[in-house]
Every structure is written in structure tokens, then in C-alpha cells.
Image: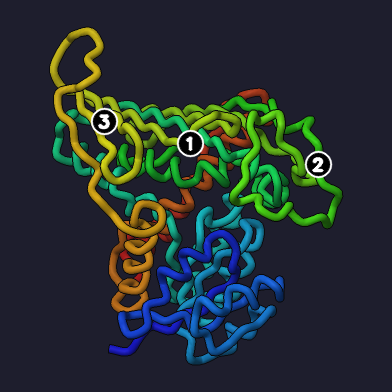
């Protein structure tokens, strides 16, 4: 079986995904690289055996020997690049979020259906051990029928990762309730087995709005990935545009009646995601999200708080970036391009996580006014839920 030949557009922080896809002789090879920054292109080229290096992504679309394209570029470019790749007949791996608007997502979905070209969206948390463990516990009925889901995201590195580059500019992301929360909203939907139909949210730019910024055109300082400032108010060299919220909370009603809540803060001392799912017969909560961490279940009572819970499940061991999820999701993508079929990730689910985050951002900036999430065209939903066959 010949290796799937993959081109990669964008060689920034998600180059780890491209490295996971580069498995010469084992199913896939990265054969072409594109980045608009020639210095980045040169620096990353040595990590692959690519035959084509280019600053113009259109050169990848013209290559008949490429089977698929991985798009790892900033969020506001996803819609254009994905549609161009699909129309060129190249299967697409699109890093989350799918786009920065609901309309952008729907345009991509329509292009994939119109061209019959395969589309895959990289919500790798569906392949993280802790998420799969929580979903398995729920599906086995250990806590009964899920009725409410609460998720909190503490982002200790937020001031460095999200406020020192394009992420801080709402014209590039819409906001961090979409850009950063897209994964968590997708996990909430997956665990609850439903999609958000109505949202409201509050948030603000509480810490990073008044801190020193860099002049336009000035790059991030060297060493920013290794040296982090503390406390948050000590951070300097922020992006010249900072107009997204650094703390936000949102409430959701799902189409199956489940009520959910999500909270995000970018100036906490620690970095962790915390999920709680309460069902008709118990609740579960994760304690950490890496191998060796645990998911605990309380399903007897009533009683006072019991820290040990009734059942403790260990998160399984894994290797590789994002708790082994990157290797798993790339493997699923390669199988999908080669053989087709239904996948654990879903373009429909990716669209619905963006839609929830987008409408929550609109609510946040409208004083918490409730907003309905636009429904997806049923014919589009059926096409993708059926495996794009």
C-alpha cells in the first residue's frame, strides 16, 4: 500500500500535527510544505523530506501527486483555504475552529458537498484518553442519563499564547469563546449527545486590556515559548490589537434538553480543563486530563461530599502530543481519505461548536442577551453524518 501524499499549509505551533502525519512507509508522507514566512519554511523543512517548498499555497493545489492538504493557518484564513483546496479536489484536514463565523462554516460544508471532496476537521480532543474515558462511562449508564454538563478552562499561559499575537484581534478570531473554546464546546456536545440551540454569555477584558503592547509589525520576543511572565499583570509585549475577552462564561440549552455551562479564564496560575457531568443516577468529574490522571464517579447517596467518590477510573497511558490525540486523529484522517466512512470527528459537530461559540460571543457583546443558534441545513447534516459518501 502506497503512502498517502500530504501537503501542509502553515508551519507554526501546530507543526506537531504535520510531524504526526509524516510516517514514510507507514501510511502517509508529508511531500510538500507551504508557509508565507520564508524563514519559517526554511527552518521547518529539515524536519521532513518534502519535495516541494513554497510560499504560495496555490502551488500545492496544482500538484496532481498530492492526495490531501493539512491546513494549519490562522483562523481567519480557514474558509478561503479550505474552499480552494476542496475545489481543487484535494482532501482537507482543517485545524479547529472550522471558521470564525457560522456562515463561513456553512460555506465550507457546501463546498465539500458540491465538489464531493472529503473534509475532515481536527477536533483532536475526541481522541484524548480522558474525553474518551468520560464518554465511555456515560454510555455505559454509570451515572444514568446526562442532564447537565459544566466545563471550566483555566488557561495559565493565556496572556502569552493568546494575547501576544493575532489571537487577540477579534477580526482574526471573532473571540476566544470561539477560538479557544471550540474544543471544549465540542466535548460538551459529544458527552451530552446533543447540540446547543440557545446561548447567553457574559465576559470582559479584565487584565490584558491595559498592559503594554508592541508596535504594529513587531514580532513576538525571542524565547516567548519558554519564558512566561508572572503575575499576569507583569506581562509585556502584547499584540498591538487586543480586543478579545480574557474571561468569559456562557450558558447553553441543547436540543435534547441538557443544560450546560462553560467558563474560561486566561489569567489563572494553573492550566487545566475540568468537566463535570451530572446524570439521573450520579455524576462524574475529571481530575487532570493526562495519562495517569483520573475520572471519579459518585453514584450512591445522598451524602456529604466524599473526595474519593464511589469509583475511580485512571486515564489510560498515551504517547505523543496532546496526550496521544494527535497521532490518533492523524491516523483517522489517513484512513478516512483512503477508505471513507464515518469518523469520530465530524464536520457537522465542528460547525455546531463554532456556532455555539459565535452566538455566545454575540450575546456577550450584547449585554448577555440570549441568542438562538442557527440550525444547519438538514440535507447538509445528512450528507456529512452519512460519511460524505
Q: Verify CB contact (< 8 Å) between mark 1 and mark 3.
A: no
Identity of the residue drawn at 17% across and 10% down: 302
Position of 357 relative to 19 (above/below): above
Identity of the residue drawn at 32% across and 32% down: 287
Distance between mark 3 and mark 2 Cα atoms: 45 Å
Q: Is residue 280 visible?
A: no
Q: Quadrant of the C terminus?
A: bottom left
User: What percent of the width, then of the height, locates residue 342?
Assistant: 29, 64
First reached walking from the N terminus: tag 1 or tag 2: 2
Q: Which residue is mark 2?
A: 213
Quarter of the figure with residue 122? bottom left
Q: Which residue is mark 3?
A: 146
- Provide the secondary structure element on which disc 2 rests: loop
Position of 63 relative to 240 (above/below): below
In the depicted view, which residue is nearer to us: 22 or 8?
22
Q: Is residue 130 left or right of residue 86?
A: left
Quarter of the figure with residue 46? bottom right
Q: Which residue is mark 1?
A: 271
Distance between mark 1 and mark 3 Cα atoms: 26 Å
Q: Residues within 10 Å of mark 2 (few under 14, many from 20)?
A: some
Position of 216 relative to 21 (above/below): above
User: What percent of the width, then of the height, locates residue 94?
Assistant: 50, 64
Q: Is residue 369 left or right of residue 382?
A: right
- Provide the secondary structure element on which disc 3 rests: strand
- Provide the secondary structure element on which disc 1 rests: loop
Q: Residues within 10 Å of mark 1 (few under 14, many from 20)?
A: some
Q: Quadrant of the N terminus?
A: bottom left
Amino acid at each position: 500500500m502506497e503512502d498517502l501524499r500530504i501537503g501542509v499549509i502553515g508551519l507554526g505551533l501546530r507543526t506537531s500535527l504535520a510531524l504526526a502525519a509524516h510516517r514514510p512507509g507507514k501510511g502517509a508522507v508529508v511531500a510538500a510544505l507551504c508557509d508565507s514566512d520564508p524563514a519559517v519554511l526554511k527552518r521547518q523543512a529539515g524536519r521532513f523530506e518534502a519535495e516541494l517548498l513554497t510560499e504560495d499555497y496555490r502551488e500545492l493545489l496544482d500538484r496532481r501527486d498530492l492526495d490531501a492538504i493539512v491546513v494549519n493557518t490562522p483562523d481567519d484564513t480557514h474558509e478561503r483555504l479550505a474552499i480552494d483546496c476542496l475545489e481543487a479536489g484535494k482532501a482537507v484536514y482543517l485545524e479547529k475552529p472550522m471558521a470564525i463565523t457560522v456562515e463561513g462554516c456553512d460555506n465550507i460544508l457546501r463546498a465539500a458537498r458540491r465538489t464531493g471532496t472529503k473534509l475532515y476537521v481536527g477536533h483532536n480532543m475526541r481522541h484524548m484518553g480522558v474525553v474518551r474515558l468520560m464518554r465511555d462511562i456515560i454510555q455505559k449508564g454509570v451515572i444514568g442519563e446526562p442532564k447537565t454538563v459544566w466545563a471550566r478552562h483555566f488557561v495559565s499561559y493565556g496572556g502569552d499564547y493568546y494575547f501576544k499575537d493575532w489571537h487577540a484581534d477579534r477580526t482574526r478570531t471573532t473571540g476566544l469563546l470561539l477560538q479557544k473554546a471550540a474544543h471544549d464546546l465540542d466535548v460538551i456536545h459529544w458527552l451530552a449527545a446533543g447540540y446547543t440551540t440557545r446561548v447567553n454569555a457574559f465576559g470582559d477584558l479584565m487584565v490584558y486590556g491595559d498592559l503594554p503592547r508592541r508596535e504594529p509589525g513587531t514580532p513576538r520576543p525571542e524565547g516567548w515559548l519558554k519564558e512566561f511572565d508572572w503575575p499576569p499583570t507583569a506581562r509585556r509585549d502584547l499584540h498591538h490589537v487586543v480586543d478579545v475577552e480574557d474571561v468569559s462564561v456562557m450558558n447553553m440549552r441543547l436540543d435534547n434538553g441538557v443544560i450546560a455551562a462553560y467558563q474560561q479564564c486566561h489569567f489563572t496560575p494553573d492550566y487545566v480543563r475540568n468537566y463535570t457531568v451530572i446524570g439521573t443516577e450520579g455524576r462524574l468529574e475529571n481530575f487532570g486530563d493526562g495519562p495517569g490522571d483520573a475520572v471519579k464517579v459518585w453514584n450512591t447517596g445522598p451524602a456529604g461530599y466524599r473526595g474519593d467518590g464511589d469509583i475511580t477510573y485512571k486515564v489510560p497511558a498515551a504517547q505523543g502530543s496532546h496526550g496521544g490525540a494527535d497521532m490518533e486523529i492523524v491516523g483517522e484522517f489517513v484512513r478516512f481519505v483512503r477508505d471513507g466512512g464515518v469518523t469520530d470527528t465530524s464536520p457537522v459537530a465542528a460547525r455546531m461548536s463554532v456556532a455555539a461559540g459565535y452566538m455566545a460571543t454575540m450575546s456577550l457583546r450584547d449585554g448577555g442577551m440570549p441568542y438562538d443558534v442557527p440550525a444547519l441545513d438538514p440535507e447538509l447534516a445528512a450528507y456529512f453524518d452519512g460519511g460524505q459518501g
